[in-house]
Structures are given as structure tokens and as C-alpha cells.
Amino acid sequence: MSPNPYAEPSSCQGGEPMAPLQPAVAEAIFGRYGYLKKLIEEANGQEDTRKLLQFCSWENPTFSHAVLHELLWQIAIAYTHELRPYLDLLFHILCMEDSWQTYRIQKSLRGIPDDHSARYVRRIPINQSDKKCTYTRYGKLKKLLYS
């Protein structure tokens, strides 16, 4: 495996990390995806978020899958004027040239599995006036992805 090109040069000495990742931090980032979801929701085009996601996704198919799933979900439910940061982040994740690049591209083209997406749509806390709009956008996106 090649070295991670997304590692910060200032944080590595001789190719080795300055300190090991604490187990609680590793669990929050790699084990529970609530943190990942919040990180992507609040990204708004921040370069630090992109760098962290690229660093953690490098040669890591499980984390890549989680990142793509959350990004595709955010793209599916976002208003048109809110899409740019998510699409930029997706672009950067898909352009990572590691052994899993093809997998990430194929996964993003397949989209979110239909049964899994429907469960998320029901869980989103939205007010009554936005509900019809969200279901309409989801239906149009689903037709676009699966036709």
C-alpha cells in the first residue's frame, strides 16, 4: 500500500504520525457514523473537512462507503442552492487515486439503495410545509438515478 498523500506533512515526522489515534476518537470517526453525518452536514465547503475525509477514506473501503452514502443522501435531500458544497466534496472523494477509486465511482453512480433511502426519508424531522417538497424531490431524484 502506498503512503497516504492526504496526510499533513507537518503532522508526520519521517512518515510516522506524531501520536497514535486515541481509541475514543477512532471510535467516534470510524465506528459511529453520527459524527461523520454531522461533519458532512456542517461542511459548507470547508477545506479541513475535505482533507479529513480524504485522509480517512484513503485505502479504506468501509469509511469510503459511509462517506459516499452520507454525501449521496445529503445531495438527495438538499435544496438546489445548497448542493454546491456536497457536490464539491463528492468530486474530491471520487478523484482520490487509490485502489478503491473505481469502487467509489461505481457506488456513487448506483446511488443510495431504494429501501434504505425510504427509511431515512421518514426519519427526517421536517415541518409539515416542507414534507411534500422533500418527498417530491426524492421521487424525482430516484427516477433520475434509476431510469
Image (cartoon, grey):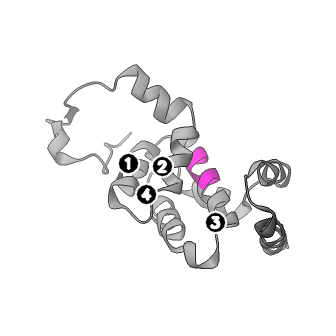
Q: Mark 4 points at which residue?
A: 97
Residue at left 72%, top 60%? 111
Up/down of 147 relative to 28, above or below:
below
Residue at left 67%, top 57%? 73
Q: Tell me, yes or no, whether the highlighted magenta stretch contains residue 144.
A: no
Q: From this viewpoint, which residue is outermost toward the front? A: 128
For the residues labelled 2 and 4, the Cα–Cα distance comes to 23 Å
Crowding near the residue tagged with mark 3, few <14, some 14–19, many ≥20 C-alpha atoms within 10 Å: many
- Kindly state the secondary structure of the residue where label 4 is placed: loop
Crowding near the residue tagged with mark 4, few <14, some 14–19, many ≥20 C-alpha atoms within 10 Å: few
Give the amino acid at mark 4. Glu
Q: Main secondary structure of the magenta part?
A: helix
Residue 78 screen position, x and y as percent? 64, 68
- Say which label, 1 or 4, has the lower sequence index: 1
Up/down of 16 relative to 84, above or below:
above
Crowding near the residue tagged with mark 1, few <14, some 14–19, many ≥20 C-alpha atoms within 10 Å: some
Q: State which region is magenta.
A: 65-70
- Say which label, 2 or 4, has the lower sequence index: 2
Residue at left 57%, top 79%? 81
Residue at left 30%, top 50%? 5
- Kindly state the secondary structure of the residue where label 1 is placed: helix
Residue 9 screen position, x and y as percent? 18, 47
Give the amino acid at mark 1. Leu
Kindly check if marks 3 and 4 are in contact, taking CB atoms under 8 A apart as contact.
no
- Say which label, 2 or 1, has the lower sequence index: 2
Kindly check if marks 1 and 4 are in contact, taking CB atoms under 8 A apart as contact.
no
- Say which label, 3 or 2, has the lower sequence index: 2
Q: Mark 1 points at which residue?
A: 52
Nearer the camera: disc 1 or disc 4: 1
- Say which label, 1 or 3, has the lower sequence index: 1
